[in-house]
Image (cartoon, helix red, strand yellow):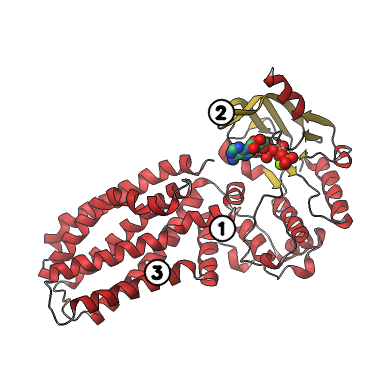
Amino acid sequence: MEKYNYKSSTLTIFMKDFRSELRTRYALNALLMFVITTLSIIMFAIGQESPSVEILAGMLWIVIFFSAMSGMSRSFVSEEERGTVMTLHLIATPASVYFGKLIFNLVLMISMNIFTVLLYFLVIPNFVVRSFDVFVITMFLGTVGLSCSATIIAAIIAKSTTKGTLYPVLSFPILLPLLLAVISATKMAIEGATIRLASGEFQILASYILVITAASYILFDYIWKD
Amino acid sequence: MKTNIKIEAINIKKVFNRTTVFSNISFILEEGSALAIAGKNGSGKSTLAKIIAGVLTPNAGEFIFSINDKEIALVNRFKYLGFVSPYLQLYEEFTALENIQIYSGVRKLNFNNKNLSSLFTKVGLFDRKGDPVRTYSSGMKQRLKYAFALLHQPPLLILDEPRSNLDSDGISIVYDIVKEQKQKGSVIIATNDKEDLQYCDSIIDLNVKVNNSNK
Ligand SMILES: Nc1ncnc2c1ncn2[C@@H]1O[C@H](COP(=O)(O)OP(=O)(O)OP(=O)(O)O)[C@@H](O)[C@H]1O
Ligand SMILES: [Mg+2]
């Protein structure tokens, strides 16, 4: 009983997804392939040119946004396809399912984005960040915000019949405020702004995360029912 | 520790895409008894079983699910019932043992290896419990679903087509489980099988209801 005895439904659901991912590598492989291909394309496209750091910051977020979308879109679709939605209904409350999936997506995206950013620094030497602390906080808040909204969008998408196409369409308006704040904060980090100067952006990001999580928690009960 | 379970359904109705599957379904299920849901293919047996389990919402009607005279809210109903059906899916990438560990973890049960062993022995899967469910035969999967349903010793057991894919050994295990469950709580069986009906104390015939609503 050691393996799954966490005394918490949420953590057990997270561990189930985590172990399942380690075995099937479904999201992980798709994510790695995506990040590596897009980064190579960016590298080839840049060639000998040296684009402004602002453009490089924008490109970094394009890679992160689309890899997040492809990696997390399946978190509920996979249960739907396997027919295990009813199994979850029979053992857990909607809240533990939602938070279990959310924690999984957080862990997946945080580790993925650490990899993406390190690789980005490595292959694009022009990308220099002056305030590293602002950059790290921005990346962290951006990743958490992205995971929170991607999780609830994935839950909505799983119930629709046109799963594939709807995802980016629905996620763009929901993610727009997050992307604007995150790109602006990344620019500030590059320009060498202090944490105090970037605190406005951080506040927007933090309130975005709070609002999305609260709304998701309320919404999920209705989405999860038949 | 007997849990006094009582289920009361009042005028349950279910509509799919504007077609009424059934309406005005009412019954009372008391502690220690078994209820059969009968009817031809497509009459709504599985639909009614899912509504009772709380995984489908009825379009009209009321359900009172009470334990020791205390009403259980819909969100908590899953804690008090076990469900077996051919369309229930377990996690194929995990072994049978891991599946059961996951379910007991999610349910926050205090389960030890001895409990686990006796559960697997009961459904006759002890020697194969370390195999991935993906490698199981359909009858073995059906047996594992009984372990899934009985894990938390629920006062209500809902069985949709209880014998599907089972051999004669498996079928007698099922009937033993039904008899045992009637000592501890109640059973609902959705079936068309004559032999299954012998273990039930009352029957809801969905064919009759369908005819009524067509009039
Ligand atoms: N998700 C759904 N969407 C639309 N219609 C549905 C859905 N599920 C069931 N139905 C319809 O409801 C009716 C009852 O289906 P149900 O599966 O409950 O029948 P059943 O009595 O269990 O049949 P069987 O004996 O074949 O198991 C059928 O006409 C079916 O087409
Ligand atoms: Mg059926």
Picture quadrant of ligand 1: top right
Mark 2 within 8 Å of ligand 1, using the beta carbon: no
Q: Residue at x 77, y 45 (%)?
A: B161
* Spatial separation of the CA atoms under disc 3 and disc 1: 31 Å
Q: Are marks 3 and 1 in contact (CB under 8 Å)?
A: no
* Spatial separation of the CA atoms under disc 1 and disc 2: 43 Å
Q: Is residue A184 left or right of residue A119?
A: left
Q: Residue at x 76, y 28 (%)?
A: B207
Which is in the foreground here, disc 2 or disc 3? 2
Q: Secondary structure at mark 2?
A: loop
Q: Amino acid type of disc 2?
A: Arg
Q: Subunit of mark 2?
A: B
3 and 1 marks on the same chain:
yes
Q: Subunit of mark 3?
A: A
Could you say which disc has been placed on residue A7 in the image? 1
Q: Residue at x 51, y 68 (%)?
A: A21
Of the pair B31 and B207, the residue shown nearer to us: B207
The residue where tag 3 is placed is A31
Identity of the residue furthest to the top in this view: B215
Q: Position of residue B65 (x, y in %)?
A: 66, 32
Of the pair B117 and B204, the residue shown nearer to us: B204
The residue where tag 2 is placed is B18
Mark 3 within 8 Å of ligand 1, using the beta carbon: no
